[in-house]
Every structure is written in C-alpha cells, then in structure tokens.
C-alpha cells in the first residue's frame, strides 16, 4: 500500500475519508480542504546506439532495486516532460541527449506511489560512454530484441511501443 497522509497540509488538522466531489476522498476535519490524490507524472529516455541496442540502468534503490529499467524519474515542477527525460538521463547515465520523438505514455499502479504516469521519449545521445550514477548502480546497452527483465510494466510497454517504431534491420 502507498504511504497514507494523516494531517491536512494547509492547517495541520486531521484528515478523514468521506464522500466529496463524486468519490471517497481525504478531507480535512478542521478547514474542509480536500486532499486530492493523483497519479504522479514521470519521464523516461529511450536511447538506442548505432547497433540498435537500448540503454538500460540497474536500479540502486527501491522500488525494484537490482532490476533493470529505463533511465527516468519524476517530473519536477516547472519542467516539461522532455526536459525531465533529458535531466534524468544526464543524472543517471552522464549522457547529454536530444529528444527525437515521443514514444508513448502509460499508466501503472505503484505500490509506493499509488499510481504513476510514465512518458517515454526517443533520445539521441552523443558518442560518449554512459556511466552509472544517482539511482543506477550499472548502465549498459542491450540488443533491443534480447533485453533482460525490465522492472516496471509501463517501461515494458514503452519498449514494446519503441520496437514498433524502430525499423528492424
Ligand atoms: Zn485543513
């Protein structure tokens, strides 16, 4: 279960579950503010090298520690989805990239965050070698058609969408 919030972020009053605006929501018992719960937006970068290999990172942190996934993370306030995908790529792999095209966007339930919406962009990254940093303990390119298990359902769907968009040699 995702972490539950107990107190109103505006006045510190206790939150209670009750029907409001069409569904059960957390509502403040003191100031009546509704605490809206929405899926969190995240962005990923799908980087292919010249040999049609896809860049993946092995996660150094939970959730899915030790599993492979796309470089990516939560979008910061004031940042576009494209900027977030390039920033996360830089933070986790050291690569500077350029967004080429939109690959897709998928929703998934998350045990940690409740729900996450994950945008994916095809990114061209220069000739430099990726180095694992931040949330990644290892980064590597894998043949697009023989990838290791990828941790998140939305990442797997993005990779499937990428395969449809990339011409097979
Ligand atoms: Zn309140």
Image (cartoon, grey):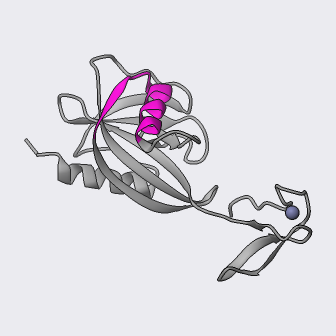
Percent coordinates x, y for residue 97 in the rendering: 34, 27
Picture quarter with the C terminus: top left
Decide if residue 149 is in sight here.
no
Using the image, determine if residue 14 lies above or below residue 59: below
Rendering quarter of residue 114: bottom right
Horizontally, residue 52 falls left or right of residue 133, namely: left
**141 or 128, which is in the foreground?**
128
Residue at image coords 84%, 56%: 10
Predominant secondary structure in magenta? Answer: helix
Decide if residue 76 is in sight here.
yes
Using the image, determine if residue 88 lies above or below residue 25: above
Percent coordinates x, y for residue 123 in the rendering: 31, 35
Residue at image coords 56%, 42%: 65
Horizontally, residue 144 falls left or right of residue 13, namely: left
Picture quarter with the N terminus: bottom right
**10 or 101, which is in the foreground?**
10
Horizontally, residue 101 falls left or right of residue 113, namely: left
- Count of number-bearing discs: 0
Using the image, determine if residue 145 lies above or below residue 83: below
Residue at image coords 21%, 50%: 163
**60 or 8, which is in the foreground?**
8
Q: Residue furthest top?
A: 128
Q: Where on the image, by quarter, is ligand 1?
A: bottom right
Percent coordinates x, y for residue 17 in the rendering: 79, 76
Residue at image coords 30%, 47%: 102
User: Is-magenta flag for residue 92?
Assistant: yes
Rendering quarter of residue 94: top left
Magenta segment: 82-100
User: Is-magenta flag for residue 49?
Assistant: no
Horizontally, residue 129 falls left or right of residue 58, namely: left
Percent coordinates x, y for residue 71 in the rendering: 44, 37
**112 or 30, which is in the foreground?**
30
């Amino acid at each position: 279960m995702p972490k539950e919030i107990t107190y109103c972020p505006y006045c510190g009053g206790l939150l209670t579950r009750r029907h409001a605006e069409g569904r059960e929501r957390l509502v403040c018992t003191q100031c009546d503010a509704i605490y809206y719960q929405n899926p969190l937006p995240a962005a990923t970068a799908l980087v292919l090298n010249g040999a049609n290999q896809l860049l993946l990172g092995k996660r150094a942190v939970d959730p899915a520690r030790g599993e492979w996934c796309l470089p990516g993370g939560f979008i910061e306030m004031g940042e576009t989805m494209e900027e977030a995908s390039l920033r996360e790529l830089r933070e986790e792999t050291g690569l500077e990239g350029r967004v080429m095209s939109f690959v897709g966007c998928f929703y998934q339930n998350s045990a940690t965050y409740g729900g996450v919406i994950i945008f994916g962009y095809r990114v061209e990254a220069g000739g430099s070698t990726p180095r694992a940093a931040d949330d990644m303990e290892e980064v590597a390119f894998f043949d697009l058609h023989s990838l290791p298990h990828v941790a998140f359902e939305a990442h797997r769907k993005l990779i499937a969408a990428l395969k449809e968009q990339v011409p097979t040699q």
